[in-house]
């Protein structure tokens, strides 16, 4: 509560100065960070295209060991907090430090960068920190993640309550899928919700002739609500009796990497399923 109060006090309106259209993107993840996910890739691909059109974009992200302020393809990346100390070594701790710093420092960021719009990227563990309540600048919520309830169960902390307040604070939201857009409308009926699916590089559609392998490999966190791993496992369980490939999972993050994770709705994993840890 104290941090929220400090953030509200710090967020004062600033008169727009001359210059290009400016975007302050609270993007939470630097694409250079080891283990960075697809969200940071999407953020960078969109922002570098905005820069090419003359927009000035600054992305604020959580710190990581060796992180420094940098410019990548014209996009400015600023780690926050700038000097996190040992917190940077833990992804979870650095995320919490990032959100706390956003709340406490948003007013300073607005005065320094004078943005025309602020983009709040929803991120774990509690999606949003009520940025629209902390500034008079226009704010757009960019939502690819809305699973604070899962994190609340995982860490036994009330992240879902913060998410509920944060989501209610927004009046303009962008979702990356129709299903997510419908869920946002259900939870916040007064908000304007636009659905803009993620894109793919044209190179992804280039046909390549490669030998057929004998493995189906999954790389990522062992989660169902955000990753849909249960759907993959069910599909593989149906195909396994007639398919030779082996299904191997390589997990990342704070997950359980054992056959005990296999969905309860399935009797047992096929013998060809492996867990790389």
Image (cartoon, rainbow, N blue to C red):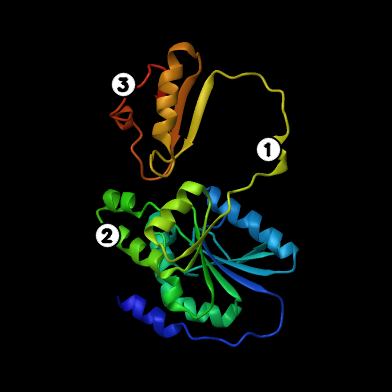
The residue lying toward the viewer, choosing from 178 and 166, is 178
Q: Which of the 4 quarters of the picture holds residue 24?
A: bottom right
Chain-order first, disc 3 or disc 2: 2
Q: Which of the 4 quarters of the picture holds residue 50?
A: bottom right
Label 1 to label 3, Cα distance in Å? 35 Å
Q: Position of residue 100 (x, y in %)?
A: 39, 70
Q: Which residue is mark 3?
A: 268
Q: Which residue is mark 1?
A: 204
Relative to 243, does residue 113 appear above or below in the rendering?
A: below
Quadrant location of the N terminus in the rendered image: bottom left
Is residue 5 among the parts visible in the rendering?
yes
Q: How many C-alpha atoms fall within 10 Å of the one at disc 3: few (<14), some, or many (≥20)?
A: few
Label 2 to label 1, Cα distance in Å? 40 Å
Mark 1 lies on a secondary structure that is: helix
Q: Which of the 4 quarters of the picture holds residue 51?
A: bottom right
Left or right of 253 on screen, residue 65: right
Q: How many C-alpha atoms fall within 10 Å of the one at disc 2: few (<14), some, or many (≥20)?
A: some
Is residue 124 among the parts visible in the rendering?
no
Query: Residue 11 bears which disc, if any?
Result: none
CB atoms of marks 2 and 1 within 8 Å: no
């Amino acid at each position: 509560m104290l941090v929220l109060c400090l953030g509200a006090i710090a967020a004062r309106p600033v008169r727009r100065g001359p210059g290009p259209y400016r975007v302050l993107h609270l993007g939470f993840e630097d694409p250079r960070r080891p283990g960075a996910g697809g969200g940071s890739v999407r953020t960078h691909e969109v922002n570098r295209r905005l820069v090419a059109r003359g927009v000035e974009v600054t992305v604020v992200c959580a710190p990581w060991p060796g992180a420094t302020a940098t410019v990548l393809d014209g996009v400015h990346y600023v780690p926050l907090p700038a000097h996190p100390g040992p917190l940077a070594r833990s992804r979870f701790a650095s995320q919490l430090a990032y959100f706390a710093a956003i709340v406490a420092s948003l007013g300073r960021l607005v005065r320094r960068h004078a943005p025309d719009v602020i983009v709040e990227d929803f991120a774990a563990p509690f999606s949003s920190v009520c940025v629209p309540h902390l500034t008079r600048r226009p704010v757009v919520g960019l939502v690819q993640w809305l699973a604070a309830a899962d994190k609340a169960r995982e860490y036994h902390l009330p992240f879902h309550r913060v998410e509920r307040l944060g989501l209610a604070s927004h009046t303009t939201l962008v979702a990356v899928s129709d299903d997510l857009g419908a869920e946002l409308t259900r939870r916040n009926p007064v908000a304007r919700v636009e659905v803009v699916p993620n894109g793919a590089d044209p190179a992804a559609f280039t046909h390549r002739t490669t030998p057929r392998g004998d493995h189906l490999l999954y790389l990522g966190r062992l989660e169902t609500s955000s990753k849909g791993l249960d759907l993959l496992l069910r599909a593989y369980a149906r195909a396994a009796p007639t398919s030779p490939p082996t299904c191997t999972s390589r997990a990342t993050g704070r997950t359980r990497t054992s056959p005990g994770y296999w969905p309860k709705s399935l009797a047992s994993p096929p013998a060809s399923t492996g867990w790389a840890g």
